[in-house]
Image (spheres, coloured by chain):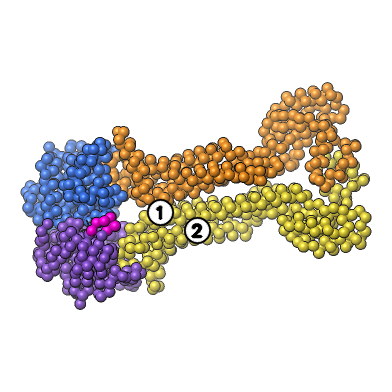
Chain colours: A orange, B yellow, C purple, D blue
Amino acid sequence: MKGRTLVRHGKEGLKNIGRNGWMSFASISAVTVMLMVVGVFLLLILNLNHFLESVEEDVEVRVYIDLTATEQEQEELRNDLEQLDHVESITYLSKDEGLDQLIDSLGEDNREVFESLRDENPLNDAFILRATDPQLTEQVALQAEELNDIDRVDYGKQVVDQLFKVTNVMRTMGIVLVLGLMFTAMFLISNTIKLTIVARQKEIQIMKLVGATNGFIRWPFFIEGILLGVIGSIIPLALVTGGYYYVYNNYASRLSLDFAELLPASPLSLQVSLILLAIGVFVGVWGSLTSVRKFLKV
Amino acid sequence: MKGRTLVRHGKEGLKNIGRNGWMSFASISAVTVMLMVVGVFLLLILNLNHFLESVEEDVEVRVYIDLTATEQEQEELRNDLEQLDHVESITYLSKDEGLDQLIDSLGEDNREVFESLRDENPLNDAFILRATDPQLTEQVALQAEELNDIDRVDYGKQVVDQLFKVTNVMRTMGIVLVLGLMFTAMFLISNTIKLTIVARQKEIQIMKLVGATNGFIRWPFFIEGILLGVIGSIIPLALVTGGYYYVYNNYASRLSLDFAELLPASPLSLQVSLILLAIGVFVGVWGSLTSVRKFLKV
Amino acid sequence: MRIIEMNNVSKTYSNGVNALNNIDILIEKGEFVYVVGPSGAGKSTFIKMIYREELPSSGSIHIQGSDITKLKSKHVPYLRRKIGVVFQDFKLLPKLSVYENIAFALEVIEEPRHIIRKRVMEVLDIVKLKSKARFLPDELSGGEQQRVSIARAIVNDPRVLIADEPTGNLDPDTSWEVMETLETINRSGTTVIMATHNREIVNTIKRRVIVIESGRIVRDELRGSYSYER
Amino acid sequence: MRIIEMNNVSKTYSNGVNALNNIDILIEKGEFVYVVGPSGAGKSTFIKMIYREELPSSGSIHIQGSDITKLKSKHVPYLRRKIGVVFQDFKLLPKLSVYENIAFALEVIEEPRHIIRKRVMEVLDIVKLKSKARFLPDELSGGEQQRVSIARAIVNDPRVLIADEPTGNLDPDTSWEVMETLETINRSGTTVIMATHNREIVNTIKRRVIVIESGRIVRDELRGSYSYER
Ligand SMILES: Nc1ncnc2c1ncn2[C@@H]1O[C@H](COP(=O)(O)OP(=O)(O)OP(=O)(O)O)[C@@H](O)[C@H]1O
Ligand SMILES: Nc1ncnc2c1ncn2[C@@H]1O[C@H](COP(=O)(O)OP(=O)(O)OP(=O)(O)O)[C@@H](O)[C@H]1O
Ligand SMILES: [Mg+2]
Ligand SMILES: [Mg+2]
């Protein structure tokens, strides 16, 4: 293909968007609307995942030290714990700190009730372990139980199992939903683009009858597909970026709970924007080329 | 319009779906795919709402009775509480039951630590109130504080405020998402249908030139729109109904947590199905009639 | 009785082309009129004025005494039902069969099915396309499509029959048969207006000839012949 | 030198219509051939075989010695570039201007812009449509559209020019001008094949006449005239 022909295809692709005015508008708005939906859900699901992760991060294993253990034995225990697989960090929690935490967790109103316990603290000193991956917590706990100088190991089995059941279901649902939405978006966008091209079936056939090769016909459609995708992505990109920055800056503190916050806007909106742009362009090109192909057999 | 003409329009509307084969398929699949998405999200959001409600239901006000109150005074207090606005139910909780609950809530491992408290129970007897609407809990608590023979009133202000903040944000987001999806679906379906009708612009103009009235042209499109909506709804309806029954019967127990369960399939799938069908038919008719109108001015 | 009367009609298309200039014409009920003139002279535009496919930019057009330029758009279909049109580009509905295309003109006036069937078969016989009743327009030759368009125009016995180069895609023999059909219809009282380039026909079947050149009527003779200067 | 050779060509359309039966024909380079016959006889089908719009159901077609029925589909465009076609239904691209429609035939062979410009203006001059270069096909009269189709067919100096009723929508004077153009092109060595219903032209400019009736060649005369029995 000669250079001037490539230029011609580029111009033609651009002009075709204008020539097919209403149809181009329909395609572009389909891209816009669907990418907006995908973008919003991507942001939601990524934040949900972040939220779930930070909830899971709170899971810890408490290794209560036997009352009879000497300083020396405690030090050995710590070393043994460090040797275990999948242990991320170890912290020491004295029995007084432990009681403070317990009383705090009971809330204002029951506090005084238990203040009496301070004098005869029934708790043990403990090491607090975090697993490298929260889902490995049980494994870490089981290993820890094998060690010496231990009173008991506690990681709230029931609560943690329940928690992981919930977070895993939510995560799976989130991924399924976002993937489902992406495929829906791709299907509908290319469906719409196909419709606009079916309407141009006669034109494609005429071009072939006048001696155009398949490549010659396809090129402008290729350019047009890219442009539809890019133009259709502008608004979703602006909204995903601008909107998320706005929400993050204005509501992040209000929305955030003690244990969870929104993902920072900076890398996230760029990543999501790139995903949206990629979908837009890919589907634009794919939708237009696959449907042109059908009418090239003249 | 004569009866036979109505019959003619009906037949014509049906035939047109066949005549425009590929285009009808595109419209129908747009309806199918979008309604499927809307259906899934409706089910999710309705269940989310149900879940949030049952979480909120757990919120209660504890009115601790003064240690000095006589049986008589306790009875009076109960009557006074019953007179309060927005009180749904009142239960009596003795201080021993209260301690049992408290110890239970601490989990297996801390239990023994507090068994010692049994002998010198520091708690008060209490009335437990539930508000008619969980969001009114604070109001009920404030009223209760005004009464006599009360030690203190406790409804976990901080936790409850936080909880309602979360549930309200989630509920709002859910509604916004589902409404957003519905409008997206409507927009895209009617967009697709419009494209198929723009492609028939010439035909509509020819009909007018041959003496057809606007009504005569519109009727078959009206029928066609209904049929597109109905046919496009079949798969989503089957999936929403069948799929939800399946999930409900097979996973309901596995998915349900101690405090939440799925909405029963029986009225829910029917309701959602009706909503989907209504959207399908409405958008089918609306999409086809509004776009025909544009080309009737010949 | 005047069936068509145009007063000072001009038409400028939206792209600025001046297709008709100050046209004044009277056509009596039952007349047979040829409209001739070079390519692009304005014949089709003139004809489109009558069934209101195009509205004039100025001037008035009376059909059976009422001014159709002032017609409310919801009354336009009733005007068009009185006028059968053979379009220069046929204007067949591409997804309907030959039979359905012709029947359409009767369905809009809500004729009962058995009458539709009878009339359609009659006109298909006239244009010799009975054997192709179930074909789609795309499966027909150019001349066959033109004859379907003719059949549709005459199927509901219109008061006025307008034919825009109805023999352009027909061989001479078929053209003469079409002319016989038009004459028969004309004899039964229908006004016939026919734009044509066919010198042989115009010079043989002598009728009123209106010559349009550059949007103006340059000649209007009662028993004219096909001739004009450029 | 034979430019077109058909051996025992038959065509049955997918709806069962038998449009051509056992056609044998030889056309030499530089010939001028009329194809005549009644409406629906198979003229257009015959012509469509040559530039491979339709493939024959049986038989072989050689253009410049190579069998185009065996041509790989990716080579078809190169065949079509050697053949200029005036389609019976014009086949103009509706969203391109007159200029762009004609230029398209030169763009596909990747001519430089200034040459495209020069050639397009030349042929627009020949068909007298220079003033309408920027118009869309819908803004033209029937005859003007036909002339654009003629202009596009001749713009790239094809070896073979095929014209399917190129004067069907033209007045006699314009028709004669078109004929002059075709003759000039023919004199420069281009083979011209023209389906027509125009008796006057065939009988005046005497050339080889192929008569097709019901899908068969019933007559083939070197200096023939327009006549056939039904
Ligand atoms: N829709 C339109 N928009 C703009 N200009 C038009 C339109 N239709 C026709 N014209 C212009 O109006 C003029 C008259 O066109 P018209 O179709 O009436 O010619 P005609 O006499 O029927 O020619 P022909 O014999 O070729 O059919 C032409 O110059 C044409 O370019
Ligand atoms: N695409 C098609 N599908 C099916 N049948 C067709 C098709 N095209 C043409 N035919 C049939 O083939 C026969 C020959 O058609 P063709 O177009 O070759 O005739 P023609 O000689 O060009 O006639 P005309 O002078 O009317 O243009 C006709 O009977 C027609 O109905
Ligand atoms: Mg005309
Ligand atoms: Mg033909």
The answer for which chain carries disc 2 is: B
In this rendering, the answer to whether B115 lies above or below B188 is above
Q: Is residue A131 visible?
A: yes
Look at label 1 and name its amino acid: Leu
Question: What residue sits 92% from the left and 45% below the top?
Answer: B119
Span of residues in magenta: C13-18
Residue C66: percent from the left, percent from the top? 27, 74
What residue is shown with label 1?
Answer: B195
The quarter of the picture where the C terminus of chain C appears is: bottom left
Label 2 residue SS: helix
Magenta segment main secondary structure: loop
Q: Is residue C16 magenta?
A: yes
Residue A6: percent from the left, percent from the top? 33, 36
What residue is shown with label 2?
Answer: B280
Quarter occupied by residue A293? top left
Left or right: where D203 falls relative to B127: left
Q: Is residue C29 magenta?
A: no
Q: Which circle's residue, 2 or 1, is located before the other in the chain? A: 1
Left or right: where D218 falls relative to B259: left
Q: Nearer the viewer, residue D81 or A44?
A: A44
The quarter of the picture where the N terminus of chain C appears is: bottom left
